[in-house]
Image (cartoon, helix red, strand yellow):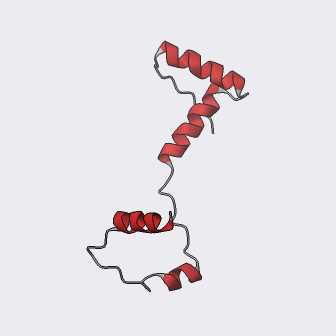
Amino acid sequence: MDTKLTIKLDRTIIEKAKKYAKRNNISLSRIIESYLNAITRDEIQNEEISPLVRSLSGIIEIPDDFDFNKDYTDRLLNKY
C-alpha cells in the first residue's frame, strides 16, 4: 500500500535527483523507496558454504606469527 510522505531536502539535491530520475526513466518516489528498502532490509543471509569448501577448512595450520606480506613479497622476488 502506497502512502504519501513529505520530506525536506536541499534544493540542489532535489534538482539533481529529478534529472537522474528523468535520465533513467524512473520516478523520484521509486528511487527513494528503493534506497529506503535497501538500508532497512534484514541482515543479509549468509551464503551457504559448499561441502567442498567446508571440507578444506582447517586442513592447513598457519603459525600465529606468519607474515603473509613477507611471504608474498618473497614469492614475487623469486618469480621475477
Q: Residue furthest right?
A: 25
Q: Residue at x 54, y 18 (%)?
A: 14
Q: Residue at x 54, y 79 (%)?
A: 53
Q: Quadrant of the N terminus?
A: top right
| Residue 17 coordinates in the image, percent (x, y) | 58, 22
Vertical arrangement, residue 53 with respect to residue 47, above or below: below
| Residue 69 coordinates in the image, percent (x, y) | 36, 63
| Residue 77 coordinates in the image, percent (x, y) | 44, 64
Vertical arrangement, residue 60 with respect to residue 37, above or below: below
Q: Residue at x 42, y 83 (%)?
A: 58
Q: Quadrant of residue 23?
A: top right
Q: Quadrant of residue 51?
A: bottom right
Q: Quadrant of residue 38?
A: top right
| Residue 11 coordinates in the image, percent (x, y) | 50, 13
Q: Residue furthest top?
A: 11
Q: Residue at x 55, y 67 (%)?
A: 47
62 left or right of 78? left
**Front position in the image: 60 or 37:** 60
**Front position in the image: 19 or 54:** 54
Callout count: 0
